[in-house]
Every structure is written in structure tokens, then in C-alpha cells.
Image (spheres, rainbow, N blue to C red):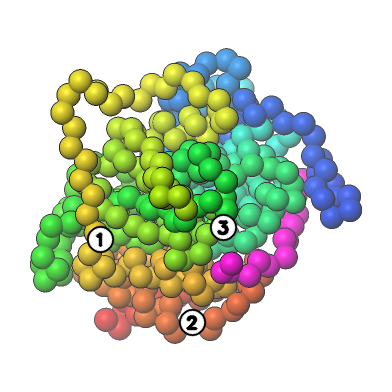
Amino acid sequence: MPGDRAPVQTLGLPAFLTYRDDFLVKPPFDRHSVAILGATGTIGRAALEVIDALGPPWRVFGVSAHRRIDELIRIARRCNPQWIAVADPESAGSATALEDGPWRVAAGGAALVDLACHPEVGTVVAAVVGAAGMMSTLAAAECGKRLALANKESLVVAGSLVTDAVARSGGELIPVDSEHSAIFQAMRSGAVHEVKRIVLTASGGPFRTWPKSKLVDATVADALAHPTWQMGRKITIDSATMMNKALEIIEARWLFNLSADQIDVVVHPQSILHSFVEFIDGSVIAQLSPPDMRLPIQYALTYPERKPCPCPKLEWSEALTLELEPVDRERFPALDLGWEVVRRGGSCGAVLNAANEVAVEAFLDGRIRFPDIVAACRAVLDSHDFEPKPSLEDLLRLDRWAREETLRWITAS
């Protein structure tokens, strides 16, 4: 299979965890006790709604945010967590209202790791956007938690480290992305060796029918006008370039241990058929539901059980049309980057993800044009010193290098 695995590396975990014979010894965890990392984002807010609807014994033990303190305080007053973690120390220090409650407050990147590893947390919803969520995701994996993963970048950057940590610790890795949740559910219909391929569906975003020549004039407002999903700005731009699907190709490789030739993409504008699995006998198993992230979030929490969910349901008494069409790889060259990273493995994912984060920010700030996002990613990926078996230190170093190199490319373009 592609992508050699690097040795698991520990992160300096809290003292209540110990190692014995190279395996993590952990206390028993209550999976109903949830930490939501990135609670102020789209996924975090949806997770709060799901836990509210599930009711006891489900509870929010801790929440985190980067610097949206006012919203974090509103969330805390609503769900009364025991822990609050703020990634940005300056924001935490200037918000005296944080101390106005029964919760413990911690600040800095280590605070997210401490929350993910806390012995009273059984399930970690990893919803921090971008590479910023990688260390807390790795920590939860090493601690043996149920990891409800929305932070796809952790697998894109450090897939071998995360999956090895889960295997060693006895934890669980359950996808929250709607596409990978659909694959996860459909794969219960057969054995792993019976899977011929998986097919990820893509809405096509706002530019599905635009002529390629017109994309150079696409504005930020055009790119943010997603036809079916309500998401954060960065993820919405990724959907417009289809870089999100490239990252999902890489994520699928690690979640399901597949080769590049076993992962395909089709366009499905209605965003109802969330992805499907084709088995070797020709059977195709799909998961369908209205586009609402509460369903995959709840499934990640309650698996293998199913519970009533607050999201809308399909109405089978009304006419329903589901379209599937081939993806236009000339209009969306980002997709080829995803397959390339799966085939090459090593350090490619870390470099691609870092370059994309910087390029998307530059586009949102009006410093580059829409097609330049993927062009910058291609240039930086091609110019990096490939490392076939990167350590965690290598990945962090290459992440920094790729961000600096992308800024240089933007300045020179």
C-alpha cells in the first residue's frame, strides 16, 4: 500500500498517562463526556446541538476556541463545561469574563492538548480548522480516545502518525466529514478485502458550470457562494477550488487504507448522496441524507448505535432527482494534487496543506486571483525537498517552509 508509516512519536503527554511495553496504559474513559475542539466553528456549533438533542448521559466536558472569546463565553454559559481552552493566550488574557464561571480556563496550544488528554474526556470532536488542530488530534489519538475527526488536515499532514497512534493506544478514529462518514457507514456492508473502490461525491461548488476562462475573474463573493452547504470561509474556498476534495482523497487513503487507484470522485450537485462504496461483486452501497453536518457528527458520537437526530429527513413522497456527472479535472486541477500526494506519500501532504492554507488566505485578502491558489500549491509542492519517511519534527519544519515559500511565490507573482 502507498505511504510508508513512520514510527509513532509521543508528545509529552500529561502525567496520568504512562507507557508499558510500548503501549499506552490509560484509564477507562466515558465516551459520553465530550471535548469539542473548535467549538465556535461550524462543526463545533453543530456538535453542541447534537449533544443537546441527545441529552443525558451525553455532556460537554470542555470546549476550545482560538480567539472568538465572546462566542466561546456564550457557549460556555449554555453548556456549562468544566474546562475552557483558548489557543491564543493574548485573547484569553484580555477576556476577564472567562473567569466568570465555574470552569477551569487554560490558554495556549498546550491547553488544547491537555483538554484532549484529560482523563474525564472520552470523546474528542476535533473540529479545529487547518494544521493548527494537528497536535491536539495526535494527542487524543495517543491517549486512546474516541476521535470524531473533522480536522482532515491532521491526516493530510500526518496520516501515518495519527493512524499508528490510534492502533497502539486502542482508540477509535471515526470520520465526521460527510463523505467519509458515508464511506464508513457503507463499508459495514462488506469486508475490507471486498472493496473495489470508493467514490467521493463533490457538489462542484459555485463554479461547476463556469467556463474555465472566466475563473480568473472570480471574486471572493463568487467563491463563497456555495450552492448547498453552509461552511466557514476557508472550507468554502476549498470547495470552490475542489482542494477540499483533494484533501479528502488523502484523508480517505489513511482512514480506509486504500491506494490512489481505489479512490474516485464524481460531481453530485444536490449534495444528498454523500459518497458510496463499490464492492468486487458489483454491488454499490451509498449513504443518502439532506446536507446537514449534525447527522455525521451524531453518528461519530453514538457509533455503532443510531439515535433520532435533529437534522431534516428526506421526503420520499415528493419527486427527487439525483444527478451524477464526471468531474472536470481541467477546470479543477487541485484534484490531481490529491491523487499525487496519495501516490507519493511522505512529506507531500504537509507541504500541500500548508501551501493551500496560505494561498487561500491570500485570495480572501485580495492579494492573488482565484486560479493562483492551486498554481501556488503546485509550485511549492514541486519545489520541496521530498522526505519519504518524515518524523513529526520533519513535518513541522516542512509546514513552516511551505508557508514561507508560498508567501515568496505570492510576492513574486
User: What residue is shown at x 49% (from left), y 21% (from top)?
Assistant: 307
Task: Estimate the x, y position of residue 239 in percent, counting from the top left.
Answer: 30, 54
Residue reaching furthest right? 21
Please tell me whether mark 2 sits on a helix, a strand or a loop. Answer: loop
Residue where numbered disc 2 is placed: 384
Q: Are marks 1 and 3 in contact (CB under 8 Å)?
A: no
Distance (Cα) linking label 3 and label 2: 26 Å
Residue where numbered disc 3 is placed: 257
Q: Residues within 10 Å of mark 1 (few under 14, many from 20)?
A: some
Disc 3 residue type?
Asn
Distance (Cα) linking label 1 and label 3: 23 Å
Disc 2 residue type?
His
Of residues 313 and 152, the one drawn nearer to the viewer in this rendering: 313
Task: Estimate the x, y position of residue 254 in percent, counting from the top left.
Answer: 55, 57
Distance (Cα) linking label 2 and label 1: 28 Å
Disc 1 residue type?
Val
Q: Residues within 10 Å of mark 2 (few under 14, many from 20)?
A: some
Please tell me whether mark 1 sits on a helix, a strand or a loop. Answer: loop
User: What residue is shown at x 22% (from left), y 54% (from top)?
Assistant: 325
Answer above or below: position of 187 versus 386: above
Of residues 118 and 146, the one drawn nearer to the viewer in this rendering: 146
User: Mark 3, mark 2: which one is toward the viewer?
Assistant: 3
Answer above or below: position of 375 versus 42: below
Q: Is residue 349 magenta?
A: no
